Every structure is written in structure tokens, then in C-alpha cells.
Image (tube, rainbow, N blue to C red):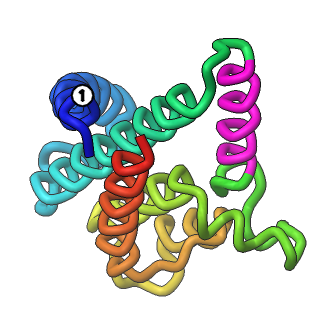
Amino acid sequence: VSSFVASSALTMALYGVFESVCVSVILFFMVNIVPTSAPDFGQVFALFVVSNILTNWVVGNIIRSIAYCFSNLVMAFVVGVFITSFGMLYAGFVVSPDLMPAWAVWFYYLSPLSWGFRAVSLIAFTSETYGAGQENSLGRIALDIFGVFPDRKWIYYGMVYLFVINLVFILVQ
């Protein structure tokens, strides 16, 4: 890894942390994902912020890697829009994995956006506010609608996946 890539990644990571924390705080409290009086408020909020930081960091490094691969701005933009659109389509919030054709489900499991979406969904809907641990709770129903496994271990799998993919895209740069 060159010194330019390392310094660029560090600079963008610091900027991304600031940006993600600001957006996460506004989003978390504006939507009132979990009330501040909830017993698991601190854990839910911390995991929400960390998940958003990792997702932001990965998306930034993917876009930067695409930009470094092309000498022409127009080509980089076209390829970047295509890859971003493809990632969003198969992230799970436009098309649920239950509704995807069998041959396309692997796009869902490769998309970093799907791992971020799955982690944030699990963080919110497996909290005590939404009836964590109950079979027919509101959180369980919401997760079933989006085809997300209701096991909290997927939160940590998602964070590890996002971190590893981030390192891969830093090395690609």
C-alpha cells in the first residue's frame, strides 16, 4: 500500500467517522428507533453508530477504488453508478432476498450494503423495545418481511464483513 493510499484512507476514515456520527445521531433520535428510557438504549445506539461508520467507510472506499481504476472521469462515473445501483438493488431493502431469483441471491450476500442494512435492521428490531426474544413480536415480524435472520450474531458477522471488505478495497486502491 502506497503512502498516498494510506494517508487518503486515514483522512477519509476520520471524515467518515465524523459524518457517520452526525448522521447517525440525527437519524436515531429523529426516527426514535429506541426510546432513551429503554434498558438497552446505550448498546443499541453504539452498535447503530458503529454499523453506520463501517458502511459509510466501505461505500467511500468502493467509490474511490472505482475512480482510481479509470483514467477518464466519465467512465469512472458510469461504472460507479452501475455498481452502486446494482449494490442497492440487491441490498435487501428494494428486493427482499426471499423474492430474488435463486441465481441472484449470492449478489445479496456479496453486497456490502446488504450487510450494513441487515446489521442496522437487527440492531433496531432485536432490541427490547420491539419485543426481543418473543416469537411473534413486532421486531420479528419486521425482520421476516425483509428476509433477515433474527439472530443477533449476524450483527457482528456484518461488522466483520464490512471491515474486511473495507481492507480489500483499500488494498485495491
Place of residue 90 in the rendered image (x, y in percent of width and height, measured from the top left): 71, 55
Q: Residue shown at 34%/77% (left/top)? A: 152
Instruction: Determine the residue positioned at 57% across, 71% down.
Output: 148
Label 1 SS: helix
Residue 25 visible, this angle:
no
149 relative to 28 in the view: left or right: right
Question: Relative to 100, is 14 above or below?
Answer: above
Q: Is residue 164 above or below residue 88?
A: below
Residue at (34% x, 63% y) in the render: 164
104, above or below 116, in the image: below
- Residue 110 against residue 172 in the figure, above or below: below
The residue carrying mark 1 is 4
Q: How many marks?
A: 1
Q: Residue 85: within the magenta?
A: yes
| The quadrant where residue 32 appears | top left
Q: Looking at numbered disc 1 in the image, what kind of residue is underneath it?
A: Phe
Q: Residues in magenta?
A: 75-89
- Identity of the residue drawn at 11% across and 61% down: 39
Q: Crowdedness of circle 1 by 10 Å Cα count: few (<14), some, many (20+)? A: few
The image shows residue 47 at horizontal and vertical percentages of: 22, 55
Q: Is residue 47 magenta?
A: no
**What is the quadrant of residue 158 in the picture?**
bottom left
- Please provide percent x and percent y for residue 137: 48, 74
x, y percent for residue 13: 22, 33
The residue positioned farthest toward the top in the image shown: 73
Asked if residue 15 lies left or right of residue 148, the reply is: left
Figure quadrant of the C terminus: top left
Look at the magenta stretch and give its main secondary structure: helix
Quarter holding residue 18: top left
Q: Nearer the viewer, residue 107 or 136?
A: 107
